[in-house]
Amino acid sequence: QQQVKQSPQSLIVQKGGISIINCAYENTAFDYFPWYQQFPGKGPALLIAIRPDVSEKKEGRFTISFNKSAKQFSLHIMDSQPGDSATYFCAAKAKTSYDKVIFGPGTSLSVIP
Amino acid sequence: SQTIHQWPATLVQPVGSPLSLECTVEGTSNPNLYWYRQAAGRGLQLLFYSVGIGQISSEVPQNLSASRPQDRQFILSSKKLLLSDSGFYLCAWRKAGQETQYFGPGTRLLVL
């Protein structure tokens, strides 16, 4: 299955709170899991990425948690700020001749003051 | 450093008209290049990818075509646009052997 599921579709969080976005996959051949952040009218930008042999990766306020046995991974944004308001896409890269990336449908995050 | 450009930024075209969107990458050679379409409020759908000059593969059969006339140039075309071609078109590049794709600023296409 070449699908990546993502939830919730939209999320509203108070400033200073924790934003959590969850993703799940079925293809065990995926070997790289990036998260992208997209602001309105802009192209997605890589936020953070993880490989399946690592259970957690942290960069500043952003943390990926990865559960290989459950085939799930999640993005945690600590101390969420209004500037974090954007659409977040989880993704998974498959091992093909061109390294195809499968994107989740996206989560629209709004951080309110 | 590498940069990726797309133009135009915005385009309004009538149904049945031709289309040409251009993407260029600077600061790298022999990149893998990708065209995606993003419908409003939706995820990214891979349309075409290219691993080299003149080498184009299509992911989804459709009204569009792609070409790569130069190493760092990727063009998305259509002979006759449909209403359903409206969307946000994103070009991306990836350095061969590395994992991350980097996206351009996108072209918003509205077909009326």
Image: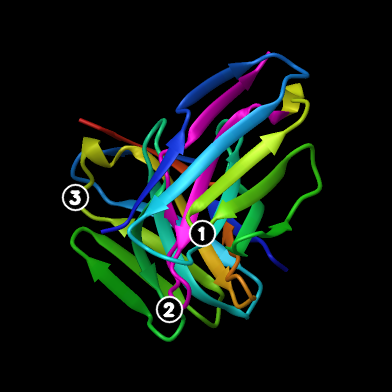
Between the C-alphas of marks 1 and 3, the distance is 43 Å
Q: In the displayed structure, would residue A94 be above or below residue B67?
A: below
Q: Looking at this view, is A80 or B13 the one in front?
A: B13
Q: Chain of mark 1?
A: B
Q: Along the polypeptide, which appears first: circle 3 or circle 2?
A: 2
Between the C-alphas of marks 3 and 2, the distance is 25 Å
Is B35 in the magenta? no
Q: Residue furthest bottom?
A: A53
Choose top left, top right, bottom left or bottom right for residue B98.
bottom left
To which residue does mark 2 refer? A51
What's the magenta region?
A: B85-112
Q: Position of residue A33 (x, y in %)?
A: 47, 69
Between the C-alphas of marks 2 and 1, the distance is 30 Å
Q: Amino acid at mark 1?
A: Asp
To which residue does mark 3 refer? A79
Left or right, A75 with reference to B46: left
- Helix, strand or loop under label 1: loop
Is the Cβ of the residue at disc 1 closer than 8 Å to that at disc 3? no
Give the residue displayed 36% in from the left and 37% down from the top. Answer: A39
Q: Which mark is residue A64?
A: none
Is B110 in the magenta? yes
- Helix, strand or loop under label 2: loop
Give a yes or no on whether discs 3 and 2 share a subunit: yes
Q: Chain of mark 2?
A: A
Choose top left, top right, bottom left or bottom right for residue A62.
bottom left
Q: Looking at this view, is A55 or B5 the one in front?
A: B5
Left or right, B61 with reference to B48: right
